Image (cartoon, grey):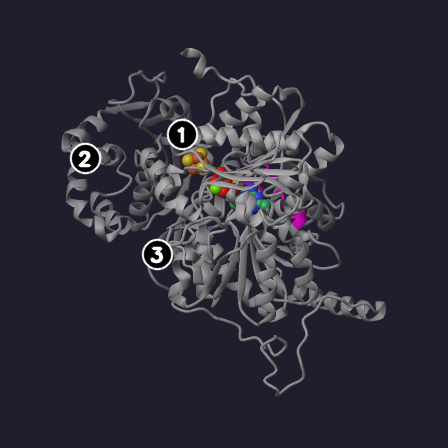
């Protein structure tokens, strides 16, 4: 480990990508994540890589489709409205099994909405914002240090499974500065990319990257192959932080920056004699269902706290499967749930 | 557990963000846990700018503050907005060259420093934020002057390092005011 | 004298949010004056962009619609086809019109869509804090071209009027500037004619206005006006590209 430095979340994302061997970045400016592009614009030339400010997010994501087809480690980043525009190429990339990393520093929607922190894109990210039966891995860091570690991991997961991997943060995480400690070198998975288009060199049969399968039987087979891959990812790559859950009176489900607020709540509640547990999904897909199943009978109730009108709570309900009541507290529009209102809600539930 | 929750606020251009960043950096150099959260977006344009800084012995929970133990206000709108954020016994530092109203709260400690005037007398208006930080460090002890100086070296670009002795003088002036 | 500074009726009595020295405000005023002079406030529908002018629906007194980034010409098309007798205009920046919305503007022009576009070319993305725009000049430093725009990497400044003037549907195409009084007068004339072309049903009309962004150019407002004159005009020559002699 090197020395600790104080860095902005967005810049850490770009730095982590460079350390993970990403040399191709395509993006389009949008608040609150544009510092990612600024950082690449400054640093990429030193690495001999490519930074392109595309004409749109549609183009940027299709540039990713091209670069990933060509076998490169590639990344794009945006915020909610821009991520909506990427959905076409996301669906195509998923079908063509292209590895790439997409960062969404979520802002409040719908529509042009606002620029403040939100978690309102949970459904879009985990249930398929584009068309078709596909999944992508969604990682939700809650600190700048974890942002670094998960960006590196995202590239490895993408390559290992030939899948898209999304880093989902929010405006707060992108804009805040925290201490980060970079490793001297990264563990980079050396994936076989013999499928990539590189030119046959007249030495092999041609490689094809495509997402069109006109024959229904062939397309169904391809879908089965994708589903098998997603099953494997769910088995191997589910990540979760379980905190203070043994003997908890109530277990809160929260991810990203909201989970940090819950950690404050846990301390304050303790003083009142209330034991609050936290299950923090680190992968939003695959969802850590097992952690909820394991603790389903422990608390009196569950509470999902989100910066949304109620999205992850649906997965929490499915996982808890009726064994305990599952409550919800959410703020929208860029408003952030306060310790005070969360505590009040907890007291009310436990009454 | 010791934790200092600070809000810095003023006009864009008064060095609010760099003041917050310097304290966060110095806190990190003290081996404390720190977070720095700036206000961002169009509201920064010409208007007020603020940031939330936490320096703590334990990992920082929420980086966003709903209340603070220290507020440093460098203009009137900032004081109007953030005075109410202070916890009882909290510290309010105001630039009295630019703020002419008395605080409403009676349950807080108030330090009025004519920082802009002092900086202007020193010949560099850009030091006003550092003068304020001098008082902040003196009254809170949140970071040491040594680590503050080390933070200056980290935060300022190399070509501005020649300013550090004067910045430290501004800090000292604020401490002694 | 006071009469000169009277606020046009089509401009609401609201303080604008633009930075000091930004010419967005001047262009709003000219558009509003033209709407007043043509007596069309009651039939005009404007479309706001995504850019610093995103909320100019608050400033114009006519009906207004806010569009997604770059899509204003498509939104305006929808409005115009529903209300062919109304006057429909879009107000768009250079990121909005010449990057993400290139397809929409080209096809609206090519269809000869009877709408008017006011196109603010300030050679930068203002709203998102100073990234390169398609119109950024060679060598110009921006947050995403920190070493200056290089044609081998970022391509060349996009001359929108020249490009659109190759399209038959584009009836009126003119580039104007805001850097001094004389040019502001010309700009207003062009804006008026563009609306008249639409009202005469002659086809698509666009006025490109060279504008300042002192904030993201990092210079004071006076220097910014000079920069328009000395740096922008050589790349973006002023004048009419199509429809000069149209009778309206
Ligand atoms: C789909 C989408 N992508 C990106 C953005 C972010 N965005 C807001 S304004 C803007 C650029 C504005 O630049 P320009 O059109 O030149 O207008 P100016 O601010 O310079 O007047 C961008 C990229 C967005 N709102 N929506
Ligand atoms: S950022 Fe630039 S374009 Fe936007 S209001 Fe300010 S000066 Fe005008
Ligand atoms: Mg612009």
Q: CA distance from mark 1 to mark 2?
A: 40 Å
Where is mark 3, residue-wise? A4
Q: Is disc 3 placed on a helix, strand or loop?
A: strand
Q: Would you say residue C18 sits in the magenta stretch?
A: no
Q: Which disc number belongs to residue C182? A: 1
| Left or right, C113 with reference to C126 | right
Mark closer to the observer (3, 1): 1
Q: CA distance from mark 2 to mark 3?
A: 32 Å
- Ligand 1 within 8 Å of the CB at mark 3: no
In the rendered image, the quadrant that contains the C terminus of chain B is top left
Say if labels 1 and 2 share a chain: no
Q: Is disc 1 placed on a helix, strand or loop?
A: helix
Q: Which disc number belongs to residue B124? A: 2
In the rendered image, which quarter is residue A158 located in?
bottom right
- Ligand 2 within 8 Å of the CB at mark 2: no
Say if labels 2 and 3 share a chain: no
Location of residue A142 in the rendering, given as x and y in whole percent from the top left corner: 51, 49
Label 3 packing within 10 angstroms: few (<14), some (14-19), many (20+): some
Q: CA distance from mark 3 to mark 1?
A: 57 Å
Residue that sits furthest to the bottom in the current view: A203
Location of residue A211 in the rendering, given as x and y in whole percent from the top left corner: 72, 66
| Left or right, C156 with reference to B56 | right
């Amino acid at each position: 480990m090197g020395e600790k430095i104080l860095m902005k979340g967005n810049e850490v994302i770009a730095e982590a990508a460079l350390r993970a061997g990403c040399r191709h970045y395509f993006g389009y400016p949008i608040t609150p994540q544009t510092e990612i592009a600024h950082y690449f614009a400054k640093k990429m030339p030193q690495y001999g890589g490519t930074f392109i400010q595309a004409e749109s997010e549609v183009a940027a994501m299709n540039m990713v489709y091209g670069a990933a087809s060509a076998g490169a480690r590639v990344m794009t980043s945006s915020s909610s409205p821009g991520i909506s525009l990427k959905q076409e190429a996301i669906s195509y990339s998923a079908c063509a099994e292209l590895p790439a990393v997409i960062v969404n520093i979520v802002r409040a929607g719908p529509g042009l909405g606002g620029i403040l922190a939100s978690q309102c894109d949970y459904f879009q990210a985990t249930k398929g914002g584009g068309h078709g039966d596909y999944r992508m891995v969604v990682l939700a860091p809650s600190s700048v240090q974890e942002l670094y570690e998960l960006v590196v991991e995202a590239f490895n997961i993408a390559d290992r499974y030939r899948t898209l991997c999304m880093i989902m943060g929010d405006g707060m995480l992108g804009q805040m500065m925290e201490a980060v400690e970079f490793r001297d070198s990264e563990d980079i998975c050396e994936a076989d990319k013999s499928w990539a288009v590189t030119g046959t060199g007249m030495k092999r049969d041609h490689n094809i990257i495509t997402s069109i399968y006109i024959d229904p039987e062939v397309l169904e087979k391809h879908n089965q192959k994708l589903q098998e891959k997603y099953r494997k990812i769910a088995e191997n790559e589910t990540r979760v932080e379980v905190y203070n859950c043994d003997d908890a009176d109530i277990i809160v489900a929260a991810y990203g920056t909201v989970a940090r607020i819950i950690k404050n709540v846990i301390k304050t509640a303790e003083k009142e004699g209330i034991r609050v547990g936290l299950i923090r999904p680190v992968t939003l897909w695959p969802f850590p269902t097992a952690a909820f199943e394991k603790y389903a009978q422990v608390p009196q109730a569950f509470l999902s706290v989100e910066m949304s009108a109620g999205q992850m709570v649906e997965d929490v309900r499915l996982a808890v499967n009726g064994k305990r009541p599952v409550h919800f507290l959410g703020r929208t529009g860029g408003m952030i749930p306060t310790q005070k209102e969360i505590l009040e809600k907890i007291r009310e539930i436990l009454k | 557990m010791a934790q200092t929750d600070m809000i810095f606020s003023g006009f864009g251009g008064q060095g609010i963000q760099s003041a917050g960043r310097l304290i966060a950096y110095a806190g990190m150099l003290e081996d404390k846990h720190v977070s720095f959260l700036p206000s961002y977006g169009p509201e920064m344009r010409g208007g007020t700018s603020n940031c939330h800084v936490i320096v703590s012995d334990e990992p920082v929970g929420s980086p966003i503050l709903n209340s603070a133990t220290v507020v440093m206000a460098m203009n009137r709108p900032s004081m109007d907005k953030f005075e109410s954020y202070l916890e009882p016994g909290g510290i309010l530092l105001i630039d009295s060259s630019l703020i002419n109203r008395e605080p409403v709260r009676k349950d807080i400690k108030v330090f009025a420093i004519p920082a802009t005037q002092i900086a202007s007398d020193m010949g560099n208006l850009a030091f006003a934020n550092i003068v304020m930080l001098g008082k902040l460090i003196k009254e809170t002890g949140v970071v040491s002057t040594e680590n503050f100086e080390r933070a200056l070296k980290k935060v300022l670009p190399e070509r501005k390092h020649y300013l550090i002795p004067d910045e430290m003088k501004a800090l000292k002036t604020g401490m002694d005011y | 004298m006071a009469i000169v500074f009277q606020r046009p009726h089509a401009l609401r009595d609201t303080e604008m949010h633009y930075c000091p020295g930004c010419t967005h405000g001047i262009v709003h005023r000219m558009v509003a004056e033209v709407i007043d002079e043509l007596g069309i406030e009651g039939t005009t529908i404007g479309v706001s962009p995504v850019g610093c002018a995103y909320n100019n629906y608050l400033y114009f007194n006519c009906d207004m619609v806010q569009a997604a980034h770059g899509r204003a010409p498509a939104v305006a098309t929808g409005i115009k086809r529903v209300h062919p007798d109304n006057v429909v205009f879009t107000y768009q920046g250079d990121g909005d019109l010449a990057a993400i919305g290139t397809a929409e503007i080209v096809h609206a022009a090519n269809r000869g869509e009877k709408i008017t576009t006011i196109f603010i070319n300030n050679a930068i993305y203002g709203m998102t804090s100073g990234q390169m725009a398609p119109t950024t000049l060679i060598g110009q430093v921006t947050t995403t071209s920190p070493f200056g725009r290089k044609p081998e990497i970022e391509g060349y400044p996009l001359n929108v009027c020249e490009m659109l003037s190759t399209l038959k549907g584009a009836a009126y195409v003119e580039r104007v500037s805001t850097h001094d009084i004389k040019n502001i007068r010309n700009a207003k004339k062009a804006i008026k004619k563009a609306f008249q072309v639409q009202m005469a049903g002659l086809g698509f009309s666009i006025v490109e206005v060279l504008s300042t962004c002192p904030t993201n150019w990092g210079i004071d407002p006076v220097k910014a006006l000079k920069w328009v004159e000395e740096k922008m005009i050589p790349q973006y020559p002023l004048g009419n590209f199509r429809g000069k002699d149209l009778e309206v």
